[in-house]
Amino acid sequence: MLNYFMGTLSHNTVVAQGFSQMLKGGRFIWYYWTQKKLAQWSEDDECFIFQGEIEAFRYLGKDATHKRVVKIFKAKPVWTIRDVVSGLDGYSKNQIWHPASTNLHFSSTSSPNRFKSYNSDYYGELTEEESISFEFDASISTTLIYSP
């Protein structure tokens, strides 16, 4: 359980073959810290766009990177997310989502896999939940649609 909350799997991001983006050491120690390469916002007529890239999973591949582009549409409750992982050929990747609402619907270039996950809003309180992952090789695009 501790590895779940301390690792990448408990976040809305990408894991490589179950491995976290950084290597866990003893107690509160982490090795191969992620490093920002790019983080920027832009806007067009239809949406707000975030582009980010980090050096991650470097203990699995010295040139490994994770790039994410998020488009937040202005006129409708829709987000599109594109993830690209480079430098980790031979590793399966999973895009992880922990939806806080049953009104959030996913559409992706991959089939969904549901798995047991956990949430802890307060210290000492734990709830079991269901999360979603999408397996991919090098890149994936997913659309999130909120429908009340």
Image (cartoon, rainbow, N blue to C red):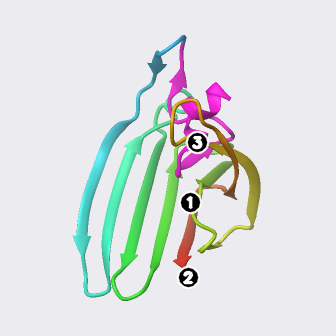
Which numbered disc, 3 or 2, marks the residue closer to the eye?
2
Residue at 29% across, 50% down: 38
Q: Work out whether 50 lies above or below 9.
A: below
Question: Residue 100 — which label?
Answer: 1
- Amino acid of disc 1: Ala
Depth check: give the residue in front, 138 or 112. 112
Q: Say if the magenta span includes residue 23.
A: yes
- Amino acid of disc 3: Ser
Say few, some or many: other residues with alpha carbon within 10 Å of mark 2 (under 14 / 14 to 19 / 20 or more).
few
Residue at 58% across, 30% down: 124
Q: Work out whether 17 lies above or below 49.
A: above
**Is label 2 in contact with label 1 (beta carbons under 8 Å)?**
no
The picture places residue 119, in percent across and down from the top left corner, at 60, 44
The residue at the far top in this view is: 26
Lateral position of residue 63 relative to residue 44, left or right: right
Q: What is the magenta range?
A: 1-25
Q: Say if the magenta span includes residue 6.
A: yes
Residue pointed to by mark 3: 10
The picture places residue 43, in percent across and down from the top left corner, at 24, 76
Q: Earlier in the sequence, mark 2 or mark 1?
A: 1
Lateral position of residue 2 relative to residue 40, left or right: right
Residue pointed to by mark 2: 147
In which quadrant of the rendered image does the C terminus lie? bottom right
Say few, some or many: other residues with alpha carbon within 10 Å of mark 1 (under 14 / 14 to 19 / 20 or more).
few
- Amino acid of disc 2: Ser
Cα–Cα span, label 1 and label 3: 13 Å
Kindly state the secondary structure of the residue where label 1 is placed: loop
Lateral position of residue 38 relative to residue 12, left or right: left
Q: Earlier in the sequence, mark 3 or mark 2?
A: 3
